[in-house]
Amino acid sequence: MNWRGLLDENAVADLLPVDNAHFAKPLCDGLAVFLEGLPARRQAEIFTQQANLGAAASMSERLGLLARSSPVLQKIGQILARDRRLAPELREQLRQLESWPPTISVEQIQANLVQELGPLGRRGVTLEPPALAEASVAVVIPFRQQDAAGGWQEGVFKLLKPGIEEVLESELSLLEDVGVHFSERCDELGIPRLDYQQVFQQVREKLLEEVALDDEQQNLLAAREVFAEDDRVHIPA
């Protein structure tokens, strides 16, 4: 796919702060390097999604949909959504990346849980669909669990999306390629001379933390201790 020919630098520049409009070129260039590195099947799927938006779609809509097609782009989009210097219509599209209606079926979620935990009935667990939310790497679904006294406790399962670890590893490698591309073409792209490969390596490390759910559980335990005396804050068990 010729992504460079499809990314409109002028339209992207209009979404950036006036003082940063010159970053539209490296932004489009980096996106092209990333997208061209994806498997041909995924590129075709993304292109079809963009085509289905129609010719009247705004660049904000196109970038928002583009971010949904990739866990790495989604995470970057979530970060950018907090930047008040960006055009409001772009931020509105990016804010939707925090959570959208689940695309993973309840049957797939249950199959994954059974694979991890064994038959749910043996644990007194009953799923309470629909799923609450789906984000870049995980999906969250409520459940009830019967206790020894016959009562019910409520909770949620947070599961990694099927195959997400492999997809994330592949995309993070492409992100490093973008860093190399930037580092080698600072003058051509009009960007500061930095070690962009190192910058993107740090992004890689942060994104890999997203799939380390064991670490997340430990963070929740630590947070419960920190906020134990604060009635305004409730940390899930």
Image (cartoon, rainbow, N blue to C red):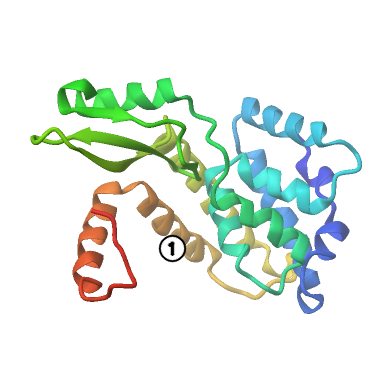
Outermost residue, bottom side:
19
Percent across and percent down for residue 180 are: 57, 57
Residue occupying image coordinates x 18% and y 69%: 225
> Where's the N terminus, which quadrant?
top right
Instruction: Please tell me in which quadrant of the rendered image residue 49 appears.
Output: top right
Residue that label 1 marks = 202
Residue 30 lies, in percent from the top left, at 67, 54
Q: Nearer the viewer, residue 136 or 40?
A: 136
- Image position of 190 with respect to 50: above or below: below
Mark 1, other Cα within 10 Å: few <14 / some 14–19 / many ≥20: few
Q: Can residue 180 be seen from the camera position used here?
A: no
Which residue lies at the image location 53% right of the left edge and 35% below the top edge?
A: 102
Residue 152 occupies quadrant: top left
**What number of labels is visible?**
1
Quarter assignment of residue 116: top left
Residue 43 percent across, percent down from the top left: 67, 32
Taking the view exactly as shown, the residue that stands out farthest to the front is: 150
In this rendering, position of residue 165 left or right of residue 183: left
Q: Is residue 122 left or right of residue 21?
A: left
Residue located at (57% from left, 58% from top) = 78
Residue kind at label 1, given as amino acid type:
Gln
Q: Nearer the viewer, residue 47 or 105?
A: 105
In the image, residue 55 sits, relative to residue 163, either above or below, namely below
> Of residues 116 and 210, which is closer to you in this image?
116
Residue found at the far left of this picture: 148
Q: Where is residue 64? Give x, y as percent.
A: 69, 49
